[in-house]
């Protein structure tokens, strides 16, 4: 009899361009099936055409089977999974701290549920798969044991449709991530304000959906207007994957001011597209970069703007940054991550 290794997640929208967690799930499923396992995806409300199934349809509760709980927010799945008589693995992506959401999104705060559900799972999981050293530390602090690190799966073959960069004189800055308070897009806008004074022929692309936190988006739009940057700052909202690739392909530098990340896949995407990275040193970001890119310890906007200008005008420096990033990127190859997963499942 083939072993079953199924995944559970509260919501599953694999067509999302910024869906790093969803891509992680699909690659894990593909890897498991290639290894001869039976593997399905179960969720609360399956999106039509996603291939996922209703969680209530799961009837394979057996000590011989394994379930992986893809976890980043509390949900009714927690109580459901606790009752199953299977081997259970927590795939932990990190939970956004409530402090970032209290003022701007009560609904999102309720959805995430803080760390209440996380603590319920301490004695229910056989082991845990953290996405980074940072999320591993979080789990350890909660009281979890038997924690392993498995980076987020990312298949760069999908990105090979690289656009032919349009002839341009402008310098384009980019950040990719949902428009939510912990990502601190306002700090990127403020930094761009000063860089735009140095180089008026410049644009800022903030890529990411913003329906989940409308008050924060309103705040960002007002900030852009107050700084008279409406013609040069683009808040894209939800975009397609092809559009995402095009934005990367026509950008010059990646700026990250986020103050909470469990892994931050866009850092790897920026590496792949040969964009030098400037990032605020917080949570998982230094672990993902590991001595590559440029890490900053404080958010002095004029100084960061000067740094951007130096990197974009000094071709030798820019080339050295990109070279180190490319070496780091090799460690996250799909083959390496697949091998780690299979070894882990075999040990279970």
Image (cartoon, grey):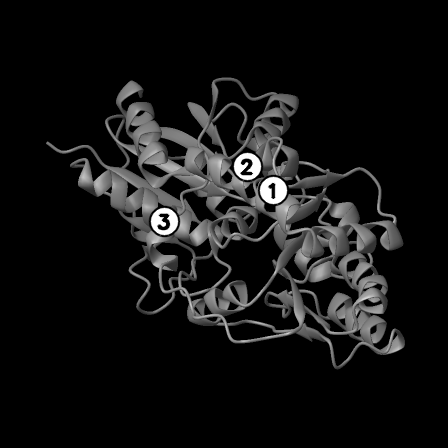
Relative horizontal placement of residue 66, taking residue 75 as reference (left or right): left
Q: Which mark is residue 324?
A: 2
Report which quarter residue 230 is drawn in.
bottom right
Marks 3, 2: nearer the viewer:
2
The residue labelled by disc 1 is 321
Q: Residue at label 3?
A: 155
Under circle 3, the secondary element is loop
Question: Rounded to the nearest whole Å, what is the CA distance between mark 3 and mark 1?
Answer: 23 Å
Q: Point out the tag, 3 or 1, that comes first from the N-terminus.
A: 3
Quarter of the rendering occupied by the C terminus: top left
Q: Is residue 37 left or right of residue 76?
A: left
Tell me residue 214's x, y (percent).
71, 70
Q: How far apart are marks 3 and 2 (CA)?
A: 20 Å
Q: Residue at x 26, y 22 (%)?
A: 346
Query: Badge 3 local density, few (<14 within 10 Å), some, or many (20+)?
Result: few
At which x and y percent is residue 265? Answer: 52, 47
């Amino acid at each position: 009899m083939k072993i079953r290794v199924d995944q559970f997640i509260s919501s599953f929208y694999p067509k999302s361009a910024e869906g790093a967690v969803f891509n992680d799930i699909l690659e894990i499923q593909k890897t498991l099936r290639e290894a001869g396992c039976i593997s399905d995806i179960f969720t609360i409300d399956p999106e039509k055409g996603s291939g996922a199934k209703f969680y209530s349809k799961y009837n394979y509760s057996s000590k011989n089977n394994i379930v992986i709980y893809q976890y980043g927010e509390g949900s009714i799945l927690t109580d459901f999974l606790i009752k199953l008589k299977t081997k259970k693995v927590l795939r932990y992506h990190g939970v956004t701290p409530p402090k970032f959401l209290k003022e701007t999104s009560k609904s999102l705060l309720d959805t995430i549920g803080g760390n209440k559900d996380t603590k319920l799972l301490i004695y229910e999981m056989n082991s845990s798969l953290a996405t980074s050293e940072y999320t591993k530390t979080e789990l350890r602090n909660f009281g979890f044991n038997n924690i392993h690190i498995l980076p987020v799966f990312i298949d760069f073959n999908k990105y090979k449709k690289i656009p032919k960069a349009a002839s341009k004189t402008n310098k384009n800055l980019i950040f990719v991530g949902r428009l939510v308070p912990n990502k601190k897009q306002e700090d990127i806008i403020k930094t761009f304000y000063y860089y735009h004074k140095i180089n008026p022929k410049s644009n800022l692309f903030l890529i990411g959906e913003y329906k989940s936190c409308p008050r924060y988006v309103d705040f960002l739009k007002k900030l852009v207007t107050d700084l008279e940057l409406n013609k040069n700052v683009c808040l894209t909202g939800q975009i397609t994957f092809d559009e995402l690739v095009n934005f990367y392909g026509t950008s010059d530098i990646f700026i990250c001011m986020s103050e909470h990340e469990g892994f931050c896949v866009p850092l790897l995407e920026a590496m792949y597209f040969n964009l030098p990275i400037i990032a605020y040193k917080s949570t998982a970001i230094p672990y993902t970069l590991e001595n590559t890119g440029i890490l900053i310890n404080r958010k002095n906007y004029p100084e960061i703007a000067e740094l951007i200008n130096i990197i974009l005008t000094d071709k030798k420096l820019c080339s050295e940054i990109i070279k180190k990033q490319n070496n780091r990127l090799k460690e996250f190859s799909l083959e390496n991550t697949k091998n780690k997963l299979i070894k882990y499942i075999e040990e279970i």
